[in-house]
Image (cartoon, coloured by chain):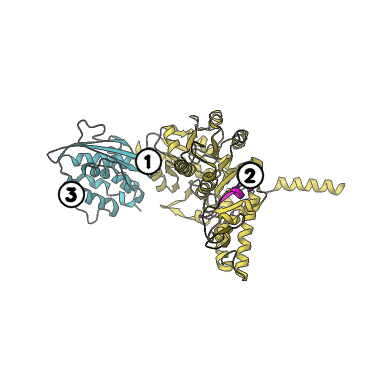
Amino acid sequence: MSELTDLYQEVVLDHGKRPRNYGPLEGATHRAEGLNPLCGDRITVAARLVDGVVHDVRFEGSGCAISKASASVMTGIAKGKTPAQIDAIFEQFHRLVTEGPGGVDGDALGKLAVFGGVHEYPTRVKCASLAWHALRQALRGGGDAVSTE
Amino acid sequence: MMGATGERRSESAARRIAPAFDPVRAREDFPILRQRVHGRPLVYLDNAATTQKPRAVIDAVSRYYEEDNANVHRGVHLLSERATRKHEEARARVARFIGAADPREVIFVRGTTEAVNLVAQTFGRTRVGAGDEVLVTELEHHSNIVPWQLLCQEKGARLRVAPTTDAGDLDLDALEALLGPRTRLLAVTQVSNALGTVTPIDEIIRRAHSKGVPVLVDGAQGVPHLGFDVAASGADFYAFSGHKLYGPTGIGVLWGRREHLEAMPPWQGGGDMILSVTFEKTIFNALPYKFEAGTPDISGAIGLAAAIDYLDALGLDAIAAHERDLLAYAVDALAAERDVRLVGTPRERAGVVSFLVGDVHPHDVGTVLDRHGIAVRAGHHCAQPLMQRLGLAATARASFGLYNTREDVEALVRGLHAVREMFA
């Protein structure tokens, strides 16, 4: 049996309580809303792209500890990356939260490794992915609300 | 004379010594409750979502498939006759349970949702026109909102919403003020699934009828805790689900006044709902079959009747008294926790208590409780408009059944201490 502390690791709890890059982003060029219909949680992610690179990214909204921590860590990682790089990281991250740490490129994950316990909690995968779906939707230029469903 | 007195005395003595309802003993009737979850004894507090099934229901369903299975209303052979008889006995059992004078007023459906949709698509479509109004309340479950929304969109009608107070009670005067000359139906719940509010349903029906407005009562949460007497209430329609009443999933009931059901067009077409079919014209069957197209959930109906028999044998009043006592205990226990905020403090409550723990998200509360073996619901409870009214995205909800005990409440409180520890 996995322990609760595998899911709620110290770093996750810390980012959930004190999310980084939280609040509105002035001069945002890309924006999208993520919605988890299961719980009604909403997260808006806004990014400012300069020369095809994410210069700044922030998020707002309500969510559980997992979704807020994921958004918080994500915004830290996304800065300085291109949309293609972000897609590649998301691919590794998605594998991590659905299948677990085995077979995932640890170097690509970096700090995201703290979400290694999520795969033991299938109902929480959507919480962990919500901000990522919103960011990728925003960068694709969509801007509409995305849903985890 | 002596004999009569003696009889009376022995009757009242029998009443005194009748064993009180014992939830610990009743637990033994529910095989699923014996298991451990994440290494802890299961504490099941998600009864408003669905109740567990007693052995009597599981056996009735198995026995039907092992001994009687056949299609109903068509075979000339013995099994079909038996299946038909059991199916119709189940209908009569449901009718007795809700005080319906005529079993033909009991339509078997998949659940409350299908019952509401049936009324919207038949009664609604023939009664509601452009500029008309359908009145619902802020307490409603999505299943008593969306069917009416669809109907109103189709007809160019207007969906009106009766407000709640901050405590989670209906504002009756505001509701009455919304009952206008264009109101074609009031659809209202007996008990709120999100807050546990018991609505003053008799008074609501009285006020609606005084304005000539028929009333559909959503009994999904009400019937397991309070029961319902369709005749005494004067309701026009009553809907509930078997699986929230210790019966199987996939079976539910729509009760309607005979004059309404007779006047309503059929809903789904198919076998069983017809008397004769030619390509030119179909003659529809009589009640209740007019609304039961296709092979029904025979085992579900039999399982539901077994659930009602089971509850009856335990004593509906005794169960209700136990649940009232337990709910009051749970509300007090949660209110005594310094970082727990009760969501909704209605005048009368049944089955449900919704709460928040500090600023911990309800989903995190639910996950931590689950790892302690405690099953609760976390989310918007399919009542997003009510959540918006309360300014919340979600709550945690503990909901009780006949087999829950004070020990379960104490386990919940200990679980909340673990939540607090983790997120302090």
Q: Which residue is mark 1?
A: A40
Report in which chain the residue with disc 1 lies.
Answer: A
Disc 3 from disc 2: Cα separation: 64 Å
Q: Which residue is mark 2?
A: B230
Report in which chain the residue with disc 3 lies.
Answer: A
Disc 1 from disc 3: Cα separation: 31 Å
Q: Is the residue at mark 3 from the same chain as the one at mark 2?
A: no
Letter of the cyan chain = A
Q: Secondary structure at mark 1?
A: loop
Magenta region: B246-263
Residue extending furthest toward the left? A51
**Location of residue B25 with respect to B338 vertically, above or below:** below
- The number of numbered badges drawn on the structure is 3
The type of residue carrying mark 1 is: Gly
Number of other residues with Cα within 10 Å of mark 2, as a class: few under 14, some 14 to 19, many 20 or more: many
Report x, y in % for residue B34: 50, 55
Number of other residues with Cα within 10 Å of mark 3, as a class: few under 14, some 14 to 19, many 20 or more: some
Circle nearer the viewer, 3 or 2: 2
Report x, y in % for residue B262: 61, 50
Q: Is the residue at mark 1 from the same chain as the one at mark 2?
A: no
Q: Is residue B367 left or right of residue A48?
A: right
Q: Is residue A47 left or right of residue B100?
A: left
The colour with which the image depicts chain B is yellow
Report in which chain the residue with disc 2 lies.
Answer: B
The type of residue carrying mark 3 is: Ala
Of residues A101 and B411, the one nearer the viewer is: A101
Q: Which residue is mark 3?
A: A108
